[in-house]
Image (cartoon, grey):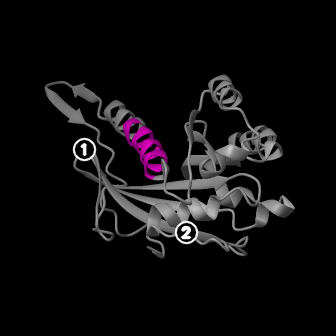
């Protein structure tokens, strides 16, 4: 079960998610819609690093999502490996009314895979669904692209909120399930004589000594 949580300072897991894609596809508005339920009709490309946080609950565990925006750097292909470092999830965003933004998804995906963990959970997002009457990217092409690259896919509208929560929560759920699965593998019983030793990974459970960043929502 997934639900929203208001407790920002108490969490079991901290997951970093990055937004990638061409400038102007709506990445910043997706972030602000999910974290603050806001939308800026006159949104301009952000300059400088931007991130926000949102806390939700999955299976009674408090998940804090730290979501990073490329902040306009994609216009100059100036994104560095530091942006991707530590990311366990990514939203690959394009504008369904701009075919070139969809074509460029392959380049963004290649860069993402080159600079992040092989276990990162990726979702392709066709944004601006509210402008579907101006659609330039057939949904079948988007589905094929996602299937060929083994990533998730959804269409959203940051303007009217369509599927925005669903997109972020699906990725967070995939990350959580993968994390729990990995922890289960770590909790391997090692028998030494008559003694059973259980190895358990507790690094990111309510760890207040690291992973604490500024909160924007």
Is residue 101 shown left or right of residue 189? right
Q: The C terminus is located in which quarter?
A: bottom left
Is residue 129 shown left or right of residue 14? right
Label annotation for residue 198: none
Q: Nearer the viewer, residue 155 or 74?
A: 155
Instruction: Name the outermost residue toward the left.
Output: 194
Residue beneath the point at 28% across and 68% down: 7
Q: How much space separates mark 2 and mark 1, taking CA atoms? A: 30 Å
Question: Which residue matches tag 2?
Answer: 39
Q: Nearer the viewer, residue 63 or 12?
A: 63
Is residue 155 shown left or right of residue 12? right
Residue 116, position in %: x, y? 64, 45
Instruction: Name the outermost residue toward the front.
Output: 133
**Is 134 situated above or below 66?**
above
Q: Nearer the viewer, residue 160 or 107?
A: 160
Residue beneath the point at 66% across and 59% down: 26
Residue 140, position in %: x, y? 67, 26
What is the magenta range? 165-177
Label annotation for residue 59: 1
């Amino acid at each position: 079960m997934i639900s929203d949580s208001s407790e920002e300072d108490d969490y079991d897991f901290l997951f970093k998610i990055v937004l990638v894609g061409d400038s102007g596809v709506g990445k910043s508005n997706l972030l602000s819609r999910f974290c603050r339920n806001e939308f800026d009709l006159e949104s301009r490309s952000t300059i400088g690093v931007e991130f926000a946080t949102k806390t939700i609950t999955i299976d009674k565990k408090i998940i804090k999502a730290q979501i990073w925006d490329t902040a306009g750097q994609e216009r100059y292909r100036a994104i560095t490996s530091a942006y991707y470092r530590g990311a366990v999830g990514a939203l690959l965003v394009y504008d369904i009314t701009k075919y070139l933004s969809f074509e460029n998804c392959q380049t963004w995906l290649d860069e993402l895979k080159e600079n992040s963990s092989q276990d990162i959970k990726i979702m392709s997002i066709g944004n601006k669904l509210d402008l579907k009457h101006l659609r330039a990217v057939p949904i079948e092409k988007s589905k094929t692209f996602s299937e060929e690259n083994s990533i998730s896919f959804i269409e959203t509208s940051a303007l009217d909120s369509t599927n925005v929560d669903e997109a972020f929560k699906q990725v967070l759920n995939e990350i959580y399930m993968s994390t729990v699965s990995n922890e289960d593998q770590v909790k391997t019983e090692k028998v030494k004589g008559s003694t059973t030793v259980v190895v358990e990974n507790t690094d990111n459970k309510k760890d207040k000594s690291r992973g604490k960043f500024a909160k924007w929502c």
